[in-house]
Amino acid sequence: MLTRLGRLAVRYSRAVLIGAVLVLLGLGAYGAGAQDDLDLSDWSAPATESVHAGDRLRDDFGTGNPNLALLVTARDGDVDSPRTERAARELTAEVEQLPLATDVTAYWDSGSPALRGEDGRRALILAHLEGTPTEIREELGTLSPRLTRTTPELDVRAGGQEEISRQVGEQARTDFLRAEAFALPAVLLLLILVYRRTTAALLTVGVGLFAVLGTLAGLRLLARFTEVSTFGANLALVLGLGLGVDYSLFVINRYREERAAGRDQQAAVVRATVVAGRTVVFSGVTVAVSLCALLVFPFFFLRSFAYAGVLVVLIAVAGAVLLLPAALGRWGHRVERPAAPASGFWHRTALAAMRRPLLAGAGVLTILLVAASPLLGLRFGLPDERTLPEGTSSRTTSEIVHREFAAEPTDTVQVVLGEPADTRAYAAELSRLPGVFQVDAPEGTYREGARTAPPGQDRLRAPDGSVRLAVVPTQQAMYGDVPAFVERVRDTPAPAPALVGGYPGEMTDFRSTLLDRLPLAIGIVLVATYVILFLMTGSVLLPAKATVLNLLSLSVMFGCLVWVFQDGHLSGLLGFTPTGSIEPSIPVLMFCVAYGLSMDYEVFLLARIKEEHERTGDTEQAVGEGIRRSAPLITAAAGILALSFLSYATGGVVFLKELGIGTALTILVDATLIRVVLLPVTMRLAGRANWWAPRRLRRLRVREEKAEEDVLRGEYV
């Protein structure tokens, strides 16, 4: 197939390139509107207890989590003064008229101490806005500026979970655009320095842009049939450019080698397409399979990363094995340069490591294990307003509430009973739990086991007689072990079947579902990539060794996450507030992305080593020659891709900083210490065992290699 593609690209290069330009323009026009058709996501886990509780709250009680909070400050210093109360009631009536508002609770109506600041200067108005996350956040984009105001009586700030999520999305979108605006010219400049030919750099960037625009168009089309998250488009931007660079570097370099070996331009293009293209295809499949593991999670924002990853790989591979050969067929003479020197830094480093394999291997392994050691202290936690940079309005609002209020009513745990019941004893028992500020029940408000207020909230009873309770946590509970707090509520015996939800319940179920599916996702990645590498190399040992080395580089990445983002080292330099834990979905995404990219470089290097071994039969010589020819390219590709990811470290959202710094570090460690020292050392020590496979599988592999011989001898036409 690759032979036919190479011939086709050379023979019909003009038609292929004209078609590519037309397709690129069409993809750009269609993909430009992708963001408008993609959806925003929340943290709920389908079919979990908290989701069922949310359904009951909506259907039976006409309410849900209080996702909009207005922090009201009395200008005269007293929220109970008549002038403040009058203005606050007018504001409450205005909120009740909002299009999406189905339930509004204000301090001036309920008198709840949970809604009043401890010094009496501030109080809260809470509202539940009903709709999809996209609808709610679009509405808040207009509402929040309108509701934020200063009058002679009141100072009003908007906050709440949906406002925080909206501002995270806006900040992330701004960060992505700024990062890409920096990355694209920087990548182009680096490519010019690497190639020493502007035409080669422009062709490489063209393949990357083709992958990006094609993926955006594909995501927009896919959104017509299923939910696709806006974050999938963001991943397409960085992966499309990065993989386009990776694949084009290897095809163009192979073309240069073939020309230096004396082949004419057309034959060199076809051979580069066949040999380098085969490696590109294996590499693309590896990256795609790693990202496909995200499909095991029932969260559409993680699934969207899988959709984007598969699309970007398919389109980047197509650009590298069809469009790029067509361009080389016409302008190949403009990308050629003199042959590379016989030896280089990475080649000399690998040879030195193989001369003293135990010493070199032990030294590098020690460095990597020390760098990975913080991973032992990893703690998973839940996200909060500290995801945003300091000074963001919703973060400031939340910080004031945390500092001046004893309770956290926006994080109320909702308990829905499946049938009518007397909840007095149950509410009293819940109010005694550690971390509970108060419990609002149909029979009254309870604190520390005693009723402190009479019945007064009709909204706690449904028309069919079923009831619900609102368990309001303390500030300390929401900054502690939230899942443990939720489990204490769930473990308390109820007088009727109970569903426990609310924002803390949703986050607890999200984390539990994510961690429960994590072993399956990891298993899929490891098994699938092992099989792919076996099919490429015909070896049992090499895929196993590659897996171990990849996991080692990923351990360094997670060690960095813990040391920097959990423990807070370098937080001042990087501009974020550490929380003492890591939100689990980002490491899962980083595992799949970084593992695929690390295996990407493994495929490139092993393919060249295997080619040299088939030619010489000498493992040590094959490793040295493979590194001499591939390591400079891998290092250049890794540096450019790492730069693309590092550009996200300048953003304001902590999640993007984690993704950018962690992935960039993995790529650089993998392309240097792993591939240039540990890989040659392990292959040197294994010797002939590198190429061993069971007889039956070996026979299959031999037949496949014989089928390639005509191509490898250069018989193209």
Image (cartoon, rainbow, N blue to C red):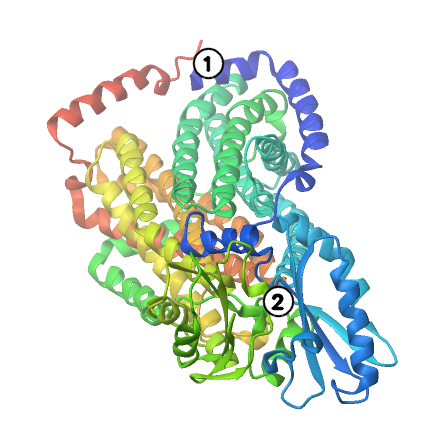
Closer to the camera in the image, 130 or 279: 130
Point out which mark residue 331 bears.
none
Closer to the camera in the image, 174 or 18: 174
Q: Which residue is mark 1?
A: 4
Badge 2 crowding class, 10 Å Cα cut-off, few under 14, some 14 to 19, many 20 or more, is many
**Residue at mark 1 to residue at mark 2: CA–CA distance:** 52 Å
Select label 1 or label 2 by which is in front.
2
Q: In the image, residue 200 lies at what x, y percent?
A: 61, 35
Q: Is residue 375 left or right of residue 265?
A: left
The residue that appears at 81% across and 89% down in the rendered structure is 76
Q: Is residue 387 left or right of residue 497?
A: right
What count of labels does the image hold? Answer: 2
Please state which amino acid type lies under the numbered disc 1.
Arg
Badge 1 crowding class, 10 Å Cα cut-off, few under 14, some 14 to 19, many 20 or more, is few
Please state which amino acid type lies under the numbered disc 2.
Leu
The quadrant in which the C terminus is found is top left
Q: Would you identify the image quadrant in which residue 716 lies?
A: top left
Q: Is residue 342 visible?
A: no
Closer to the camera in the image, 709 or 401: 401
Q: In the image, residue 367 lies at what x, y percent?
A: 33, 67
Mark 1–mark 2 CB contact (< 8 Å): no
The residue that appears at 74% across and 86% down in the rendered structure is 80
Q: Earlier in the sequence, mark 1 or mark 2?
A: 1
The residue that appears at 43% across and 67% down in the rendered structure is 381
